[in-house]
Structure formats: C-alpha cells, structure tokens
Amino acid sequence: MFLVVFFLLPALIMVVASLRYPGEFGGLAPLVSTRPGEEAGLTLESYRVFFSDWVYFEIFAKSFGVAVLTTLVCLLMAYPVAALIARSPKRYRDMMVLLVVLPFASNFLVRVYAWMIMLGPFELLFSRFAVICGMVYVHLPFMILPLYTNLEKHDPALLDAAQDLGANAWQRFWRVTFPLSLPGVFSGSALVFIPVLGMFAIPEILGGKDDWIVGNMIKESFLGTRDWPFGSMLSLMLTLAVLAVAAAASWLAGRRMSRA
Amino acid sequence: MRKLALGIEALAIAVLFGSFLASGGKLLLAGAAAALLALAGVLGLAGKRREMPGFWLWFVSLLAYAFLYIPLVIVVIFSFNDSKLNAEWVGFTTAWYLKLFSDEDMLRAALNSLSIACGAAAIATVLGTMAGLSMHRFKPKLLPFLVFTPVAMPEILLGVSLLIFFLNSVSPALGALGIDFGLGLTTVVIAHVTFCIGFVAIIVRARLAGMDESIFEAARDLGATPWQTFRLVTLPLIMPGVIAGALMAFTLSIDDFVITFFTSGVGTKTLPLEIYTMIKVAVTPEVNAVSALLMALTLGMIMIAAKLAPDLMQAKT
C-alpha cells in the first residue's frame, strides 16, 4: 500500500505533469483555468520542444556515450578482479569480495570528492576524462560482484578439458570462460549502465558544462529553470530509455542461454 | 617465501608513503606502479608453485584494487594536512577535525541524517519484511514490480517524481484540510522508506527461500494460530535477515544524496547535502575530515553488522 501511494502514484502524476503547461512562477500551471488568458489543461508542448530541437537528442546521445564508455571500462577492470577472486582458494574469497565492497561503504559524494583531489594537481579536473573516472569508480563493484558470482560457478574441469584438447590460454578464455560468463557480463553491464544515465552529481562536480548529461538536464529543469513539465517529460524519456536497455540486456542474456 | 613477500610488501608501502610525502603526490603514481609490479611479481611467482593464478591476473587485479583504495587513502591523509589546499603536504594537524566539531551547521546536519536514517530504517524494515513474507507466501504478480522498480531505476527519477507529488498533490490536498505541509524531514523519511523497502524485501526473501516449508506446516498442525506461527516460528527464523535488512536500510538512508536532494526542501540539510554544498562552494580539508569520519563510521557499522549477522555478506551478493 505504501508503495502504491508513494511510488506508483507519483510516477503517474509525473506522466500527467509532463503534459501540462509550466506555471507562471515555475512549477505547474493549474489543470483548470482560474483566470482568463491563463494557460491550463493538457498540452504536448514539452514533447514538441523536445523533438523539434537536435540539442536534446544530442544530450541523450552523449549520455548514452558516457554510459557505454563507463560500462566498457568497468568491464575491462572488473573481469580480471572477478576472475582472480573466483580462482583463489575458497578461504580468501570472502575477504577479497569484502575488499571490493568496502570502499563503497563510504559516502558517494566522498568518493567523488576523492577524485577531485586526485585529479586537481594534474589539471585534469572538469573534463570528460574526470567524469569517466568518477563514473567508473562509483560503479565498479556493480560490475565485479555479478561477474564474480557467475565466474565462481564455472566448473574448472571445463578448462582442463579444453587444455587437454589443445586450446591455448587465449582460446580457453574466448571459447570457454567468456561465453559462459555472458549472463554475468550482461547483468553487471545493466547495473552500471542504468544508474550512469540518470547521474547528475558526477558531471556537475567533476565535469565542465560540456559534460552535462540527461540527469543534469532533469535536475536543472526542476530546480534551476523550474520548468516542471519539461523536466517530467525528460524523466519519462529517461525511463523509456532505461526500460529499453533493461529489456535489451535480458533479451540478450536469454538468447545466449537458449543457444548454449 | 611468504616472509620475503611480506618484507617486499612492507618495503613497497614504505617507499610509496615516503615518495608521497616527499613530492606531494606527483610521484605517487610511479611509486604505486613500482610497488604493484613488485607485489604482483612476488604473488605471481608464489602462485606458480601453488597452482594459483598467474602474474598478469594479479597485476591487473592489484591495479584495480589500488584504483579503489588510493583516492580514499589520499582523502584521509590530506585531512591531517596543515594547509588549505589539497595539493601539497605541509605538516600534520588535527585542526580540521576540531573545526568540524565546532561547526554548528555540520552538527545539525549530522543529527538530521541520524534521525532520518533511524526513522526510515524502522519503517522500511517493518514494511520490507512484510513485503518479503507476502512475496514468498502468495507469489503475487504486481508486488515484486512495485518493490523492485524503485531499486532498479535511476535514483533521480524517484526523486523528481516524489518532488512533484509532494508539492503538487499532497501539499494542496492537506492545505485544503488546513494542514501546512512542505518539504522537510517527513518527506525525506517517506522517500527513503520507498527505496529501502526493496532492499529489505530482497534480503528477507532470500532468507526465506532457503527454508524448509514443513516447519511452518508443523507449527500449524500443532495448533498455532497464524499470529503465533509468525511470532514464535517465522520471525525468529528470519531474524538475521531482518537485522541485516535494517542495517542495510540504515546505511542506505544515511548515505543517500540524490533522493534527499530533491525531497528535502530548503531548510533541511543532511550530511551528504552539507558535503555537496561544501564541495560546490569551497573545497577545504574540512571536507576531508568529514569524509574520513564518515568512512570510520560506516566501517564500524559494517563490522558490527558482520558480528551480528554473519550471513549479511551472503545476502548482499
């Protein structure tokens, strides 16, 4: 019941809000006109603005670019760690997982701030590079943990068999380990990709104005320009994008499974 | 072999620290790389004999671990730095900590954070446990969607939708009844409960999933009412899960920034919000000091959690 009131209802209200006019002093205009000449009722104005200007499309494309890059870097860094933990003796594994999770006990802003200090002296702050660093840093465990839970389940006998059949280390990885780990790769990627899309604090703190992504635009429309209908519309677009990504990830994982 | 490895490790750390203090951080990366190389080499060689993963895997993984820890270590080190700039090591001081404890805004924010986290964790634990139980028992269709979507969605979406909801729907409705309602502690607690329920429910359900159904049937056969079954059988069994869920909710709430940012209004500040303002306005080592203290606090929480509920880690992964 609680969730119906405080999750489902606000979500629906947001859908309606995206169809309304912005209020005179920000916020939303009333649904029913109280004074003559006042804009009221429902409109597709926000959507018209969104689809009529390439700028917004570009920002969405940029957000996807940042998310893709972050996911790839996370994957590259996470795979060796996950593999190492999975292949270590059992009694060390919990400890190694704990060591991955531990930095994430510290506050999200603290971790972003740490990168401000790290990059400050090298004059790398307020750049795309800094944004990616921060994004990767904040989301890395979300990639390592699913990968590890997947890799841990692999039967080492498979690799021995591959070796006996004459596969070298590279072949063993690409033909045996990697295909088997794809469900882990997909769920980890979704766990990194989706939050990155909605992030606003990291581009704001570590990036320059050029590095703003969808999250920043949403935040700006609600708290800066106070154009709520536009912000609601953007949020809705983001929701659709997230659903599409989640659907794609589960479809890819499912297809893999049925082929294997 | 092991002693040698430990020796080299200690040496590497010493070199790392020394080079860092000497150069104010610029040599740090070179030092870290050298140390890692040495460490990975030792571990890799040791591994060859004991059928352990090889050199390169160790090397890359250690880089990743270093990537995880170096930024935080630097934050802590600079919190003791006797300089306004986070660039060069000047001297040791605890002044930033002392300043922190006399900063009234900061203390008020800490108090807010704490009371919000307690309230949100208490409510979310009760509701989340109920959700977890009913998901396990009745296998409903809509409930998992309601419980897990707030967990999976980008936080900003929940934040803004609650912002509209509170200001545009709840506030006028209560205003018509003569109740003044604005953003503040209450709205933050409600928002936190909304996203914490999912985590509690996941943990409780995971705990229930591994359980033998026949215990509950036995209780019923022995004449226990549903309430007695719950209180005497189910609750004690799921208690570790409930405690783990409560701790999880507490840490999530005290750490949350994005959702608090949208639902707190002007007057109410929590620690993360205070840190955010400080980072945006002026970066001083005072931020490092708060960060270091927060790290120590959450570290302590995790250790207590690990003592109280040893299966917390399993529930999390």
Image (cartoon, rainbow, N blue to C red):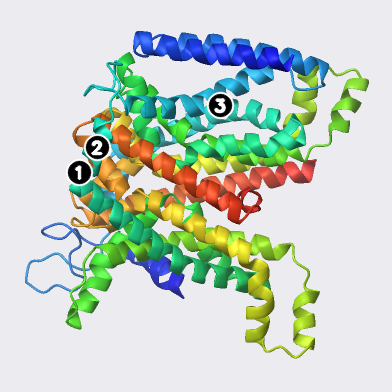
Identify the residue at image location x=24%, y=37%.
Answer: B98
Residue B255 lies left or right of residue B80; in this view the side is right
Q: Disc 3 to disc 1, how far (Cα)?
A: 36 Å
- Give the answer, above or below, for where B138 lies relative to B61: below
Chain identity of mark 3: B
Can residue B16 be seen here? The reply is yes
Q: Residues within 10 Å of mark 1 (few under 14, many from 20)?
A: few
Residue B301 lies left or right of residue B212; in this view the side is left
Q: Amino acid at mark 1?
A: Ser
What label sits on residue B98 in the rendered view?
2
Tell which of A165 and B287 is nearer to you. B287
Identify the residue at image location x=40%, y=72%.
Answer: A5
Determine contact: label 3, label 1, CB under 8 Å: no
Identify the residue at image location x=54%, y=51%.
Answer: B304
What label sits on residue B192 in the rendered view?
none
As drawn, the residue found furthest toward the right would be A164
Q: Disc 1 to disc 2, how far (Cα)?
A: 7 Å
Residue B12 pos. (x, y %):
55, 12
